[in-house]
Amino acid sequence: MSLLQPTLWFIGAFLVASLVEYWIHRLMHANARLGQRHRDHHRRNEGQGVLWEFLDYVKGSAIAMLLPFLVSIEAGVAWSLGALAYAAFSAYAHQLQHENPTKCFWMKMPVHYVHHKYQMWHHNFGLGVDWWDHVFGTYKQVDWLTETEQTTAKASYMELRWW
């Protein structure tokens, strides 16, 4: 059995999940009804905890995770694993950006943290990655690293709210 096809399904799901996350976040800023809960999130400026973020992402994408099973079981399993992997990564990244943004080493600037810190309603919509902000022209670089962020930098990657 070749691992190429399942690997491509996994990677495809990971990429599509990041794109969907970007657009849903962006739509939450464009539509008052869709964004009510999101506006509360901005007022509180905190994540729900990694587990609760993960469950929200999975609930929101459950149907899309099941569709590739219509192609094959192999495709469905690989796609679902890719989508779940991105949901877990994104839930962790979202919580990390709220609690210790300096630990987001995979981005030059933690876009979700900056999105909140500077009330950016039209910029920096990524949660786990900043790719789509670059692709769609919504990335806005700012000097974000202040004394406040440097103080929290001492905490470990695991010191955050998990539930």
Image: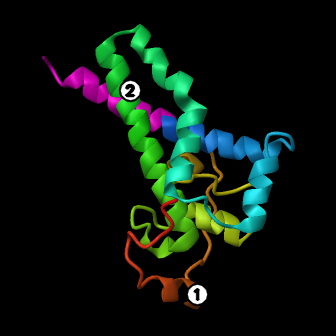
Look at 49% across and 66% down and name the residue there: 96
x, y percent for residue 58:
52, 37
Residue 46 coordinates in the image, percent (x, y): 65, 66
Whether residue 129 is visible here, answered yes or no, is no
The colouring scheme, among rainbow, by chain, secondary structure or one colour, is rainbow
* Residue 15 in which image quadrant: top left
In the picture, the disc for residue 148 is 1
User: Residue farthest to the front?
Assistant: 163
Q: Could you tell me residue 78's position as x and y percent?
A: 32, 26
- Extreme-left residue of the structure: 1
Can the viewer see residue 5 in this picture? yes
Q: Is residue 95 above or below residue 145?
A: above
Q: Nearer the viewer, residue 70 or 121?
A: 70
Asked if residue 161 lies left or right of residue 42, the reply is left
Can residue 5 be found in the magenta stretch? yes
Q: Which residues are magenta?
A: 1-16
SS at circle 2: helix
Type of amino acid under label 1: Thr
Could you say which is closer to the camera, residue 125 or residue 35? 35
Residue appearing at x 62%, y 72% in the figure: 142
Viewer-side residue, 158 vs 121: 158
Q: Residue at x 46, y 57 (%)?
A: 92
Determine whether 12 is above or below 132 in the image: above
Mark seen at residue 79: 2
Secondary structure category for the residue under label 1: helix
Q: Closer to the N terminus: mark 1 or mark 2?
A: 2
| Whether residue 150 is situated above or below residue 59 in the rendered picture | below
6 vs 132, nearest the viewer: 6
Q: Are marks 1 and 2 in contact (CB under 8 Å)?
A: no
Question: Where in the figure is residue 140, as x and y percent of width and height?
Answer: 64, 62
